[in-house]
Amino acid sequence: MSILKNFAAAAALCLGTVPLAHAQNVALGTLSGAATGQIGIAIASVASSAGEIRVIPQETANTAQYIPLVDQGQLEFGIANYPQTYFAMTGTGLSEGQPADNLRLVASLMDFTSGMLVMDDSGIATLEDLAGRNVPRFPDNSLGDYVMRAVMATADLTYDDVRAVPTANFLSMYDGFRDGILDTSIATIGSAFVMDMQASVGKVRYLPLSEEDEAVMDEILPGTRIFDVSGSGEAAVTEDTKVFGYEYLLFANADVPDAVVTSMVRALHDGREDLLATSPMWESFVPEGMARAGGMTYHPGALAFYQEHGIPVAE
């Protein structure tokens, strides 16, 4: 099934794992760099180390490139946030009229929290202050476009109120912010990008949201919640910081053997400490809550594990 089987040995060495004689090779759709890339590498390392499967990350420029590959059976697994996964599986929003009928939910991973990052000396204190400033303008109907429109809506702003700078993808956004072309960037709490900015460019901070913003964002990005990360000690977080977020999910093609999916779920369920060692982003990963995401169909291999271990499955 996987398009990466020929590269299994090389990838195993890159992941620092020892080749396993009887482990089945499976591919995981993820991104190159940034937070999603970190998550993908962590999953691959922990699941491969468990010994039952060998997980090979397949990196692309954006999630929209690998979701169809999982749906078509060219990749076994993929990871994405709740809104994008929900859109794909229901054929709405980003995937309007094009449902990925062969996707099945496997697990909730963590609360993926993000915010709008600005330089501390930018003079930008609130989202309203982005009016007239350079903000990323992602391609229409892309995830970045949805996020930016949802965030700006909380401040009653649209692209007409800002200087919209054409931005191809998230990596281009990070480069644009680092180079001073953009005045703000979407950034994940605890991601390497934020820490890199602090170390190489200067002090950065997140623009605050409020509890009332949750309903506004949820209208555009289903599943979005507001998180209070004040006092978390994470880079760029001030003493009064609320950001937006949603669950990050692992999904699979419906035809992936139940045993393979069960092996993946078992490895993650038992590997929380190893996952957390890779990044503080895994702090909110709760093994007992791996089936908490609702509104989508779970893979039978995942359901078997959850039922055996008494883990509640959301409808």
Image: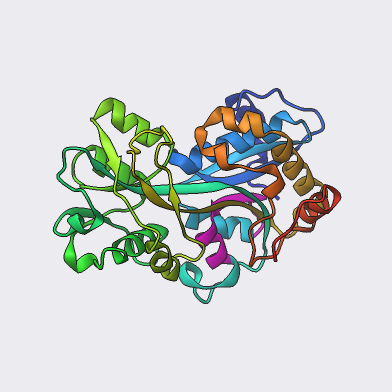
Q: Is residue 74 magenta?
A: yes
Residue at 34% of width from left, 39% of height from top?
239
Front-most of 246 and 210?
210
Task: Locate the C terminus and report the quarter of the image it occupies.
Answer: bottom right
In the visual, does 76 lie left or right of 141? right
In the visual, does 181 lie left or right of 45? left
Q: Position of residue 93 (x, y in %)?
A: 47, 71
Q: Position of residue 55 (x, y in %)?
A: 66, 38
Q: Position of residue 311 (x, y in %)?
A: 77, 51
Q: Quadrant of residue 153?
A: bottom left
In the visual, does 113 lie left or right of 201? right
- Check the image and name the residue furthest to the bottom: 97
Residue at 54% of width from left, 58% of height from top?
82
Q: Is residue 7 visible?
A: no
Answer above or below: position of 57 versus 138. Answer: above
Q: Position of residue 148 (x, y in %)?
A: 33, 59
Front-most of 11 and 254?
254
Q: How is the image coloured?
A: rainbow
Answer above or below: position of 103 versus 261. Answer: below
Front-most of 183 and 165?
183
Residue at 16% of width from left, 38% of height from top?
121
What range of the chain is rendered magenta? Answer: 72-88
Q: Quadrant of residue 145?
A: bottom left
Q: Is residue 201 visible?
A: yes
Answer above or below: position of 246 versus 195. Answer: below
Front-most of 98 and 312?
312
Q: Is residue 262 magenta?
A: no
How many marks are shown on the rendered structure? 0
